Image (cartoon, grey):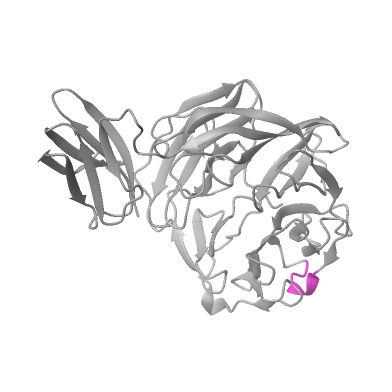
Amino acid sequence: MKKTLLLLAFTTSLAVNAQSWVTQATGFTEPSRGIDEIKIVDANIVWAKAYDGSGAGAEVQEFTLTTNGGTTWTAGLIDVGNTDLGINNIAPISATTAWVSAVNPTDGSGSCIYKTSNGGLTWENQNGTGFVAPASFINFVHFFDANNGFAAGDPINNEFEIYTSTDGGENWTLVPGANIPAPLSGEYGYNGGNVVIGNTIWMPTNRGRILKSTDQGVTWTVTQAPITDFGGTAQNGRLSFSDANNGCLLKTVGTTYTYYTTTNGGTTWSAGSTFTGDYRLLTYVPGTLTIVSTSQATGLSGSAYSSNNGLTWTDIDFGTQRGVSAFLNGTTGWCAGFSTDATTGGIFKFDGTLSNESFDATTTFKVYPNPASSLVTISSDIDAFVVSVTDLTGKVVLEKSMSGIENTVDVSSFTSGVYFFTISSDAKKETIKIIKN
């Protein structure tokens, strides 16, 4: 039986000024419709995939769509020709066009891809992919634009089954086994937990490995993460990435939660540290190192944010079930809930401003630009001060005495990532976060 990665509950964000969640109605007529995927096309167009939140475990083939930023949502059916199939994921590119992958979660039969070109009113079978039971087990599909996409499944004949398309899914080409690392014995992928940012894809496996492509699925590499299984019952974990380089991994073993970060796209990971947050569904605000965490867990539901890549957390709210989330930027995002009926509940829209400024009008020291790639300027009206720069591990990478109104620090040799500039004088001390590109 194929497992889906465990659904805990998180979201993304930046350093937050004022924040709250506004309830919106997803439009599902059945009560307790949950959301396990939110895909944002732009500030107005968002698709979300439904699941049975009642606890009955029924396969739900439904989606909801907004084209006006969530003011109204329209629910619809995903007709894949077989009500026994589970919808793995949804991959939209516009208000009209989206793809889904589907499979019988028990035995892998019925693996298929369907496309809509009219906003979900009808769905077209694109089973020319070659995913054929009983050997095939499709995991997910993704399209980068109207033409270019890929679909991935478990290994067949000692090769992961991956296809690419350059014509919107009308035709599919099998990626040669030579382009994909060979699977380990008994290795397979998961229906959830896969990540795509830009042209980069990350696919976690039951052996704790991450298959990665940076060219839309044409060629692949593999690395071992600090985990033995991304979806096991004894041990599991979920990935989140902010961009092609920066990401995090939260590993769960029983009631022990270990947090890792990467600055090179998952090739290597930091030494694990005890996770300090309460909510364990983690999502980045794209292009930042701020994370929002959410949870639907009984007795521990709510949301929080971290403005320093998971080092410390600040609560947003407590007591309301906040599911998976997605953000377009620091002011536009949604997280999942459960519907009461067609006009009540189901999803929450973020109401606030998530900022990543390194200083404000009251700051004695100003540090810019942020992000920076070569020179960082420090300006102040204080004659003399000391600058100490530390990385995320707390290691001091630079310490220097300065004087005068404006100084520069050369960070061109620094590894890409987050650094903390602690600037102190007799009268003032401030710590400012800088992102090195």
- Return the residue nearer the eye: 97 or 207: 97
Q: Is residue 59 left or right of residue 316?
A: right
Q: Residue at x 38, y 52 (%)?
A: 263
Return the x and y of residue 76 as percentages of the image width and height: 85, 48
Q: Is residue 347 above or below residue 63?
A: above
Return the x and y of residue 365 as percentages of the image width and height: 25, 34
- Quarter assignment of residue 163: bottom right
- Return the residue nearer the eye: 324 or 46: 46
Q: Taken as a whole, is the magenta stretch helix, strand or loop?
A: loop
Return the x and y of residue 9 as percentages of the image width and height: 60, 36
Magenta span contains residue 130: yes
Q: Is residue 234 left or right of residue 105?
A: left
Q: Residue at x 51, y 24 (%)?
A: 315
Quadrant of image for the C terminus:
bottom left
Which range is magenta?
A: 126-133
Q: Is residue 85 above or below residue 19?
A: below
Q: Residue at x 22, y 57 (%)?
A: 413
Q: Using the rendered image of the protein, determine whether residue 324 is visible from the camera's viewpoint.
A: no
Q: Using the rendered image of the protein, determine whether residue 61 is visible from the camera's viewpoint.
A: yes
